[in-house]
């Protein structure tokens, strides 16, 4: 069988579903290829969408009619606006979603998009006269296309670990993509290995909820999408508990059985989502770590214990959990595990996420060294819009770091690369006071209209919104009030950033005490101290050093020199 498409997307995870539907919204004929259609839009780990920085990405994606915000609104069973005690620029909308409702919302939207869903394994890329022509499946089928998006997530040469047990697979019970991985290496897309992990799932009926502090859903039912109304789902409460010395003792005594410490796993993991064995090891002086018990569903009893990702043997997982208040009788419904997989250096990509020198080949999502559904979905949008540009001869759609977190992410990935899984944080943007979750439509509405990838309803809404900004009552709206609040600071932020640019050659004395710089996080201190840059310019080239860190460092250097 030979089929012809404008765009083929490999992988129906968060990046792949957004890429395929974004390309289709621009008018492309699209095929979405995945191992198993039943796993479309699956949340591999935490049952939540959004958060600080991540929620900003979801709101930006929504302006382009992306799927994630609307699916999250349909499936929300707990809403929380994080950071509410701070200014609105860093508020982080986050919803906990019913896993199966979320996946069926994505399935339904992909089904309605005109995208053709094909079940199968992509094993090879097909080239003709040095130009990409399509993809070959394990059963010999060839699918032809003008553009191809690879969004294979954690599946490239992936291995799973639970204690001493090692399995092949990108997620528990699923395959690994070996042949495609080998082919990518062969065409020079050099790969490294990263890892991530997930906690055990608990049976909520065996948790003693009455003894634990509850955390209720927000009373005001805000929505993720500009188009959604809040759903009628009952809103569930979470609970908070903590590990203790006894828990840590159990974990320490089983350290040699952890694949993280036996040398079985070599890849680096996400800094902001470490396993519980890593936390106990790295923060030996801490007597306890917080755990949020998050219900995953309205129809079953699965609970996600946020904070105890682990790959220890299952009997150790049970043993340490039962030392924790409220979990003394807990039953595990699925064990936690770690996954190690290959990724491609994102510096091989241009700002459309196309591989430099290989026209028509795009990469999006965890394959580019990121972690998180939202980061994957944001890249899916960029790759899908631009694959359609190649496939249908349209204008590219570019995202700028001055106007979006999507632009910040693309810039960081393609210019700096990654040394560990990349996660979005507001500190990554030098313009963070201007890039708020509540003003995504203002920032990106015109780009979305120009990209011609949105519904009539969305277009009208954007036009109405942009017009209303000129009205005398604008300052009475929440967005208008936030604009007024930040106006004086935006100027200062701009000047501070210009100062960093003009001070790029400012020398950093040898042995400079980074730890004493106000506002530098532990991560930034660690990165700067180990690279020991000669000046600010060199510091700016250290992977992972954020604009916020450079500003703080600049202020401290100027003070020290005065
Ligand atoms: C165990 C685990 C724990 C995680 N923990 C966290 C966490 O704590 N925090 C966090 O933010 N993120 C976590 N993640 C990461 C999160 O799941 C990903 O960031 C996100 O799902 C990536 O989306 P994606 O679209 O890039 O890939 P995925 O969601 O992985 O989707 C990839 C898709 O590609 C398909 N596929 C792969 N190869 C082929 C092929 N050759 N042919 C056809 N189809 C193929 C797969 O079937 C799948 O549908 C975890 C992931 C896993 C697996």
Image (cartoon, grey):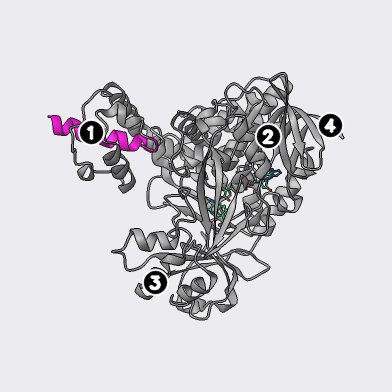
Circle 3: element type: helix
Q: From this viewpoint, which residue is outermost toward the right?
A: 1
**Which of label 3 and label 4 is nearer to you?**
3
Q: Is mark 1 within 8 Å of ligand 1?
A: no
Write down the residue under mark 4: 3
**Which of label 2 and label 4 is nearer to you?**
4
In the rendered structure, the answer to whether residue 552 lies left or right of residue 231 reads left
Q: Which residues are magenta?
A: 543-562
**Which of label 2 and label 3 is nearer to you?**
3
Looking at the image, which residue is at 26% across and 41% down? 529
Write down the residue under mark 1: 555
Q: From this viewpoint, which residue is outermost toward the left?
A: 562
Quarter containing the C terminus: top left
In the rendered structure, the answer to whether residue 404 lies left or right of residue 494 reads right
Q: Nearer the viewer, residue 345 or 545?
A: 345
Task: Point out which mark residue 253 bears.
Answer: 3
């Amino acid at each position: 069988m030979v089929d012809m498409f404008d765009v083929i997307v490999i992988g129906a995870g968060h990046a792949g579903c957004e890429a395929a539907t974004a390309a289709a919204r621009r008018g492309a004929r699209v095929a979405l290829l995945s191992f198993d259609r039943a796993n479309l839009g699956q949340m591999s780990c935490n049952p939540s969408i959004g958060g600080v920085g991540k929620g900003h990405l979801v709101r930006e994606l929504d302006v382009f009619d992306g799927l994630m915000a609307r699916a999250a609104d349909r499936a929300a069973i707990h809403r929380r606006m994080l950071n509410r005690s701070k200014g609105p620029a860093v508020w982080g909308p986050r919803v906990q979603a019913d896993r199966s409702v979320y996946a069926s919302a994505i399935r339904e939207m992909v089904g309605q998009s005109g995208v053709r869903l094909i079940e199968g394994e992509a094993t090879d890329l097909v080239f003709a006269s040095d130009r990409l022509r399509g993809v070959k499946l394990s059963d010999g089928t060839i699918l032809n296309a003008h553009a191809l998006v690879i969004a294979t997530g954690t599946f490239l040469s992936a291995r799973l670990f639970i204690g001493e047990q090692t399995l092949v697979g990108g997620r528990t019970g699923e395959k690994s993509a070996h042949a495609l991985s080998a082919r990518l290496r062969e065409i020079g897309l050099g790969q490294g290995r990263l890892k991530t992990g997930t906690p055990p799932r608990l049976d909520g009926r065996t948790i003693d909820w009455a003894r634990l502090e509850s955390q209720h859903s927000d009373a005001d039912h805000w929505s993720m999408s500009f188009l959604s109304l809040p759903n009628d789902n009952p809103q569930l409460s979470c609970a908070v508990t903590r590990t203790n010395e006894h828990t840590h003792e159990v974990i320490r005594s089983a350290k040699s059985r952890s694949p993280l410490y036996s040398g079985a796993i070599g890849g680096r993991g996400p800094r902001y989502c470490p396993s519980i064995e890593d936390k106990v090891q790295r923060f030996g002086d801490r007597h306890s770590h917080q755990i949020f018990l998050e219900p995953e569903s309205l129809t079953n009893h699965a609970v996600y214990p946020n904070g105890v990702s682990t790959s220890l043997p299952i009997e150790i997982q049970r043993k340490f959990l039962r030392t924790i208040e409220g979990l003394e009788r807990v039953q595990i419904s699925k064990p936690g595990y770690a996954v190690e997989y290959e990724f491609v250096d994102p510096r091989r990509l241009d700002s459309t996420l196309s591989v430099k020198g290989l026209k028509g080949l795009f990469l999006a999502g965890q394959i580019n060294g990121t972690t998180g559904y939202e980061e994957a979905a944001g890249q899916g949008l960029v790759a899908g819009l631009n694959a359609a540009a190649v496939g249908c001869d349209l204008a590219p759609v570019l995202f700028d770091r001055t106007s979006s977190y999507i632009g910040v992410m693309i810039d960081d990935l393609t210019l700096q690369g990654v040394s560990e899984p990349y996660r979005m944080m507001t500190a990554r943007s030098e313009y963070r006071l201007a890039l708020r979750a509540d003003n995504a439509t203002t920032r990106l509405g015109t780009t979305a209209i120009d990209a011609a990838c949105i519904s009539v309803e969305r277009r009208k809404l954007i036009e109405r919104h942009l017009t209303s900004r000129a009205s005398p009552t604008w300052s009475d709206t929440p967005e208008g009030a936030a604009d007024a609040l930040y106006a004086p600071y935006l100027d200062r932020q701009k000047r501070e950033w210009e100062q960093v640019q003009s001070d790029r050659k400012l020398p950093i004395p040898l042995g400079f005490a980074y730890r004493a710089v106000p506002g530098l996080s532990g991560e930034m201190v660690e990165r700067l101290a180990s690279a020991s840059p000669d000046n600010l310019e060199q510091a700016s080239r250290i992977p992972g050093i954020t604009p916020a860190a450079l500003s703080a460092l600049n202020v401290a250097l100027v003070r020290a020199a005065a």
